[in-house]
């Protein structure tokens, strides 16, 4: 299996139980693989190295058919391999999001469905090759707030 960084393999960034269940081939193009490699090297591996704990990728690349099946935006950066939804078991997702905000370059950083309890929600992080916005948002129950709100 193709290794994208020291601790991340392509399989982790393309696996999907929804795709498996629906028989969707979630196969990335070469361009998408390069985007996933950049995301792993510059974001996910940096997180892994700092915390010295496994980073769980809940969702990485999504082909258009899979993206539609889960009801995600047609503009989702998951479609281009520039985004991942992550968490680290045992670490508060707000703490993880704040560390990323304070230490890494990113395009969007979204604390999603966090309710103040340590294992609630997840962290969405994206990275483009150029022109990253460093935009932080908190999304919960349809409400979007600027910044990381615990």
Image (cartoon, rainbow, N blue to C red):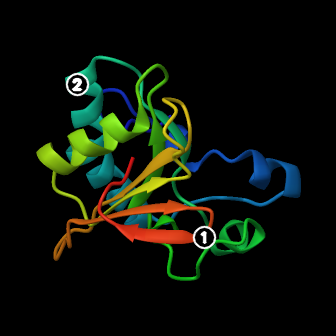
x and y percent of residue 123 in the render? 43, 48
x and y percent of residue 119 in the render? 54, 30
Q: CA separation, marks 2 and 1?
A: 33 Å
Above or below 115: residue 62: below
Residue closer to the observer: 15 or 98: 98
- Secondary structure under badge 2? helix
x and y percent of residue 43 in the render? 26, 45
Give the side of residue 4 with respect to residue 23, left or right: left
Q: Is residue 69 visible?
A: yes
Taking the spot 50% from the left edge, 64% from the top edge, the residue there is: 78
Q: Residue furthest left?
A: 103
x and y percent of residue 94 in the render? 37, 40
- Secondary structure under badge 1? loop
Q: Which mark is residue 113?
A: none
Q: Which residue is mark 1?
A: 142
Taking the spot 20% from the left edge, 73% from the top edge, the residue there is: 133
Q: Which mark is residue 49?
A: 2
Taking the spot 20% from the left edge, 66% from the top edge, the residue there is: 134
Q: Which of disc 1 and disc 2 is earlier in sequence?
A: 2
Label 1, residues with CA under 10 Å away: few <14, some 14-19, many ≥20: few
């Amino acid at each position: 299996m193709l290794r994208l960084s020291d601790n991340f393999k392509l399989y982790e960034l393309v696996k999907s139980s929804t795709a498996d269940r629906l028989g969707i081939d979630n196969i990335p193009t070469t361009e998408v693989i390069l985007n996933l490699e950049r995301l792993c090297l510059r974001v996910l591996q940096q997180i892994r190295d700092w915390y010295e704990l496994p980073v769980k990728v809940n969702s990485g690349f999504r082909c258009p058919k899979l993206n539609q099946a889960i009801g995600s935006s047609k503009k989702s950066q998951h479609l281009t391999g520039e985004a991942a939804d992550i968490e680290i078991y045992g670490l508060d997702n707000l703490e993880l999001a704040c560390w990323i905000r304070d230490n890494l370059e990113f395009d969007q950083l979204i604390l999603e469905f966090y309710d103040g309890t340590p294992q609630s929600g997840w962290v969405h992080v994206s990275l483009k090759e150029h022109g990253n916005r460093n935009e932080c948002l908190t999304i919960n129950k349809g409400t979007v707030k600027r910044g990381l709100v615990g």
